[in-house]
Amino acid sequence: MQNNLSLNEKIYIPTPSPHDPDNNGHFGSEDDKHRFGGRFVPETLMPVLEQLRLDYEAVRFDKDFWSEIDYYYKNYVGRPSALYFAQNLSKELNAKIYLKREDLNHTGAHKINHCIAQAVLAKHLGKKKVIAETGAGQHGVATATVAALFGLECEIFMGAKDVKRQELNVFRMKLLGAKVHSVNSGSQSLKDAMNDAIRHWVTNARDTYYIIGTVAGPHPYPMMVRDIQSIIGWEAKQQLDAVESCLPDKVIACIGGGSNALGIFNHFIEDDSVECIGIEAGGLGVETNKHGCSLEKGNPGVLHGQLSYLLQDEDGQIQEAHSISAGLDYPGIGPEHAYFKDNNIVTYNHITDDEAMEAFVWLSQAEGIIPAFESSHAVAYLKKMKPEEVEGKIILINLSGRGDKDMIQAQTILAEQFR
């Protein structure tokens, strides 16, 4: 009966995935070379994480729980997000290009999806405080937003380098009532912000819920955030079927930790005719040491409670990632992406800073849509593919965020071009 309802009337409830991790959070079978994921955390956090796993699994497929979340998705976030046919890009490329408009969500990105759901879970668990790490600031803003909505105390950890280049988002977080900690250790970026957030959580877990901002971290976070963000692909699949009566040929998304990508991939991953393509931050080039290509150039290691691909030196020391985009400036990747790479389930590639900036201008001027620097990486891949890979194809791109937050940085970078 639900299939006869409009998308606005349906309620998203996660479904089990054939790629679900085991109870300890490991993706893949025992025969795999690497068992990505897991829980590599201080002993004090093990019972907290195990209880969170049990609490989440109790509501994972519960209609009442997701109905509560659905209320906020439709009345607060603005879901379902639009599927837009990019007519000018399509004409230029002789293809059908569709954009899943997560940039139109309240707060301007896909991050609000998992923040709403985790805040509802935190409320059910009786937590009074929430914390989060943030890079580009979109997850921090989304966390501060839901904290204000639900009357929760909120603290955000953000690398000092990102505080400077995302000052508008820092102000938004403070305006929403959050306390923002500028992290000055290490590379002063997302990795270090997550380090400090975890350290804070270790001593405050009793009354504090940690809203992790991507499909990374210790189990159950990678599975839980993937489940929540999969509303993107769930909607897109139905929307595309309504206008094209078929599946896309390719689904493209940028990858930092990987939440927006898994969100749109998850409902297409079992369709053999669909190629899912994840785009890492190529920075100044993969031949340099200034990039964020953990899958392409990294090796398996442990960071932030998980085993996954990481940028590290010969001694296993974590190397600094680089990207023009603060949201892709992370030296690791979600463990399910690592599993997908090793098993050739998803295609992974990269886009450089220059290519991303070209796409930033291209989409702005071709469609009147200013994308986030992160999303620009996914758009840029349209020009990196060979013409025969694009022409005549139906291509779905997850436009994970809007470019408001990047205006100050873009103005500086593009000053000569728009003088």
Image (cartoon, rainbow, N blue to C red):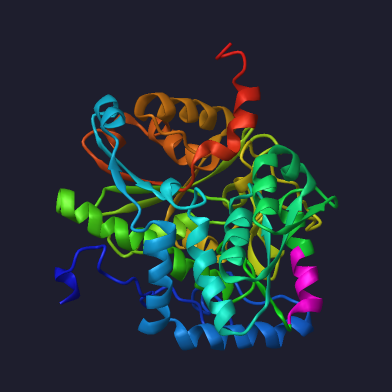
Residue 59 is situated, as x and y percent measured from the top left of the image, at 46, 84
Question: What stretch of residues is rendered in magenta?
Answer: 197-205
Q: Above or below — where is 289 with respect to 15?
A: above
- Residue displayed at 40% across by 24% down: 365
Q: Is residue 120 visible?
A: yes
Task: Tell me, yes or no, if residue 399 can be seen here.
Answer: no
Residue 47 left/right relative to 86: right
Which quadrant of the rendered structure holds the C terminus?
top right
Outermost residue on the top side: it is: 419
Marks counted in the figure total 0
Q: Main secondary structure of the magenta part?
A: helix
Q: Is residue 109 left or right of residue 82?
A: right
Residue 182 lies, in percent from the top left, at 80, 51
Up/down of 4 relative to 327, above or below: below
* Nearer to us in this view, 248 or 60: 60
- Which residue occupies 61% across, 24% down? 411
Q: Quarter of the image holding residue 10?
A: bottom left
Residue at point 28%, 28% (across, down): 88
> Quadrant location of the N terminus?
bottom left
Q: Is residue 199 magenta?
A: yes
Question: In the picture, residue 306 is in which quadrant?
Answer: bottom right
Expressed as whole percent of the image width and height from the top left, the position of residue 54 reads 55, 88
Nearest the viewer among 168 and 299 is 168
Residue 153 sits inside the magenta stretch: no
Image coordinates for residue 110, horizontal then vertical, percent: 48, 54
Q: Is residue 195 left or right of residue 66?
A: right
Q: Nearer the viewer, residue 234 or 76?
A: 76
In this rendering, the answer to whether 26 lies above or below 419 is below
